Amino acid sequence: MKIEGKLFGIVGAARSGLAVANKITSLGGKVFITDSKDEKSVINADLIKEKYDCEFGENSDKIFKCDYILISPGVPRKIPIIKKAIEKGIEVINDIELFYRLKYPETEIIAVTGSNGKSTTVSLIQHIFDKSQFKSILAGNIGTPISIFPIEHPGIDFAVLELSSFQIESLIKFKADVAILLNITPDHLNRYKDMEDYATTKFGIFKNQTNNDLAVICSDDKEIEKNMISLESEKQEFSYFNEKDAYFKDNKIWINNKYLQHKFDLSKTSFIGIHNIYDAMAAILAVSKFINDPAIIQNALETFQPLEHRMEFVTSIDGIKFYNDSKATNTDAVHFALNSFNERVNIILGGSDKGEDFGVLTDDLNQKADKIFLIGATRRKMLDEFIGVKRDIILCADLEDSIEKAFYLAKKNGVVILSPACASFDMFDDFEDRGNKFKEIVWKIKEGIIDV
């Protein structure tokens, strides 16, 4: 892809937009940044104005003079200015698509998507590579923007990418050497027309693959099975219940594909709960094409640390265990969280709405919950949709109120878990902020700063 002398319009002056702007200018391209937010709301707006041609508070027609337009995941392709640009024949892409067109040819791509489990899966894949002789980078919907890395130069064996459905929307020529689809459950239905539209977007991760590429798919997922298409790539499946290329039996992950035949013991690992086992199976299948030494993979499994805000154990207070599962932003994630415990749990639910039917949690809550604490913008909606729930449901003023009530009402040797089934933007900056606030409040209770 020719960068030098081309003008790139970048929609959004956030971190990923600035990273890609820096990459383009370093390669001789020109940049115009447009952000609909008021200048006072843009961090370091003065510095951005010094370095780039830009506008704040509007998205003017000036962007139509650009050769390419780059959008962030949060910018829908259906907004008027982007639709008009596409109608004018301007190619609208994102930083992942730009990376693909700029990357050194020998760098291979392992891309992961799904409604849940993406971050754990990509982090484990990179951890396995770290234990091997390969050099990898981790980017996409996690961690560092892809444009920060020297992607156009040799030295990177693998780019491990977490891709959201929003990012997949703007992929055109992108092709993954290994593409993983973990699951498809209701999520982001405030952005997509329906589940079929959402599922079709997720399946876009297999776009452009050939028979030299690998597609890794969960055969237990009903939406994946329902929406299965004829893939030109080599297909490998993982299952918790049935013997596939990867499956679970006797607390071991069994791999039986053309690259590797081995069983991996999970007894000394942190992989607890069916959702984490699914992620581990997918990761092992992905790397088995490149790493055929089981000892490397086993060592990586045993040394891998669970990610923050994902079924993260915080501490115990008077025998009550607290878990931070703030990343559980949809109902399917909550289903797996609840079913990770043998005992009944006290669960904190609620946040900003993404268009889900919370009633699907009714059976899980009846079977696994002791008491239910509702917070945030969805608390009234949840109360209405939990009409069949036979457990105590308590409306709370905010997160601190819910934690205090849950601790006070929890039985000794019980569990309190934040697993919201919602986004966080009604009360917090993001799910990390929500999870950190949860941990902070729990520790204040333990240290006696908050008296319950």
Image (tube, grey):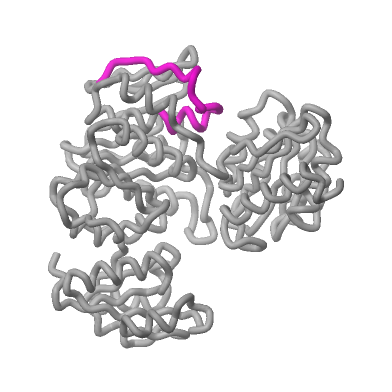
Query: Residue lying furthest top in this view?
Result: 250
Q: Which segment did they paint magenta?
A: 260-280
Image quarter of residue 12: bottom left
Q: Quadrant of the N terminus?
A: bottom left
Residue that appears at 38% across and 48% down? 162
Q: In this rendering, would 214 be left or right of 431? A: left
Residue that appears at 44% across and 52% down? 198
Q: In this rendering, would 326 be left or right of 102? A: right
Asked if the stretch drawn in magenta spans residue 277, the answer is yes
Front residue of this view, candidates 222 and 133: 133
* Total numbered labels placed on residues in the image: 0
Q: Position of residue 225 (x, y in %)?
A: 40, 35
Residue that appears at 67% across and 62% down? 427
Residue that appears at 14% across and 45% down? 106
Q: Position of residue 161 (x, y in %)?
A: 33, 48
User: Can the viewer see residue 387?
Assistant: no
Front residue of this view, candidates 304 and 255: 304
Front residue of this view, candidates 171 and 337: 337
Front residue of this view, candidates 2 and 374: 2
Asked if the stretch drawn in magenta spans residue 262, the answer is yes
User: Can the viewer see residue 39?
Assistant: yes
Q: Position of residue 28 (x, y in %)?
A: 17, 74
Q: Position of residue 186 (x, y in %)?
A: 53, 47
Image quarter of residue 366: top right
